Image: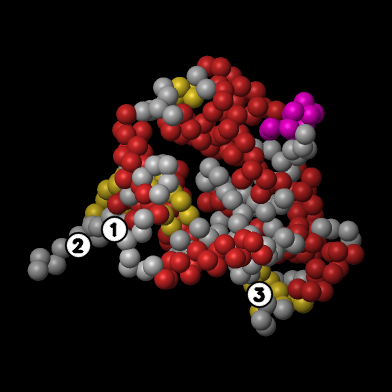
Amino acid sequence: ATRNFVMEGGAMVLADGGVVCIDEFDKMREDDRVAIHEAMEQQTISIAKAGITTTLNSRCSVLAAANSVFGRWDDTKGEENIDFMPTILSRFDMIFIVKDEHDEKRDVTLAKHIMNVHLTAGQTSEAADTGELSLNLIKKYINYCRRRCGPRMSEAAGEKLKNRYVLMRGGTHAHEIESEKRLSIPITVRQLEAVIRIAESLAKMQLQAFATETHVDEALRLFQVSTLDAAMSGSLAGAEGFTTEEDQEALTRIEKQLKRRFAIGSQVSEHNIVQDFLKQKYPERAIYKVIHTMIRRGELQHRMQRKMLYRLQ
């Protein structure tokens, strides 16, 4: 043994040029939460340990799944359902809230699938070849698309997306009429880039050199039914670009009053605090959001089985 340090790439480095699938995304260690920012934004991972200084490529797509803090998604709570930083949340192109809702037909279908998985464990499955396309053909098709096709936005598609972005960001009356839905939550440049990537991906699937207006329409629809719908329902209230000015003012007022209520080193009942703010007509979701944010910043701490709030700073 030479006793020298050896550098080995992790999951995102090994997935360079492909897709990394991350389960239990909300259970990441704190140092991994910091490292994944660079990996998702710059598509590189910087290392400076044991005399080794280098930068590794992590040019991969991220498909992640996270669990709710409470075991089940609670519609009365917003950001508190998710236990990771809003800056990470805003780096995903599409975010789907998957709820475990009771539906007899769906439950029967799911139960049958799980039973079939266990009953046919270890056996060669013919399901992959019973569809319109075989699994091997789909794999070859995806590889061919990735190697041979690199579409870009056409001028017409770019102009349409630019106009829709301005309308969506401003929440103008014209867009409300067009979409038949009030969009009071603006999107940021980061989400605009996400829609561009989705449109170009759709064009790549069709082996087209340019993303057309049709691709832009479908990309906007996908963004609408995923990230934007979640944001409108308040599920992503903590993510960058998903908080209205009116909501932000209410959050600021709640935080100022909360800090005046009890001094550093003292503790109060969380239930009593929430009830006091509810009497002042503040939304329950906003109250819990402020408490959750202050806990993340290390200003508050739960004690006595989460019944009491202790102020640290």
Which residue, given by chain and number where applicable, does mark 3 sit on?
302
Gap in Å between the C-alphas at discs 3 and 2?
41 Å
Mark 2 or mark 1: which comes first in sequence? 2
What crowding class fits label 2: few (fewer than 14 Cα within 10 Å), some (14-19), or many (20 or more)? Answer: few
Q: Toward which corner of the image does residue 282 lie, by quadrant?
A: bottom right
Q: Is residue 171 above or below residue 102?
A: above
User: Which residue: 45% across, 22% down?
Assistant: 210
Which sits earlier in the primary sequence, circle 1 or circle 3? 1
Give how far apart the Cα atoms at labels 1 and 3 are: 35 Å
Graded by Cα atoms within 10 Å as few (under 14), some (14 to 19) or many (20 or more), the crowding at tag 3 reads some
Report which residue position mark 2 lands on: 5
- Residue sticking out furthest to the top: 155
Q: Is residue 102 magenta?
A: no
- Residue 261 position (above or below residue 60): below
Specify the farthest residue to the bottom.
304
- Disc 2 and disc 1 in contact, CB within 8 angstroms: yes
Q: Do callouts 1 and 3 mark residues in contact (Cβ within 8 Å)?
A: no
Relative image position of residue 19 (x, y in whole percent): 38, 48
Q: In what element is the residue under mark 3?
A: strand
- In which quadrant will I find the N terminus? bottom left
For the C terminus, the quadrant is bottom right
Element marked by disc 1: strand
Magenta span: helix, strand or loop, mainly? helix
Which residue is at a point 23% across and 57% down the rendered structure image? Answer: 7
| Mark-to-mark CA distance, 2 and 1 | 9 Å
Q: Residue 49 got which mark?
A: 1
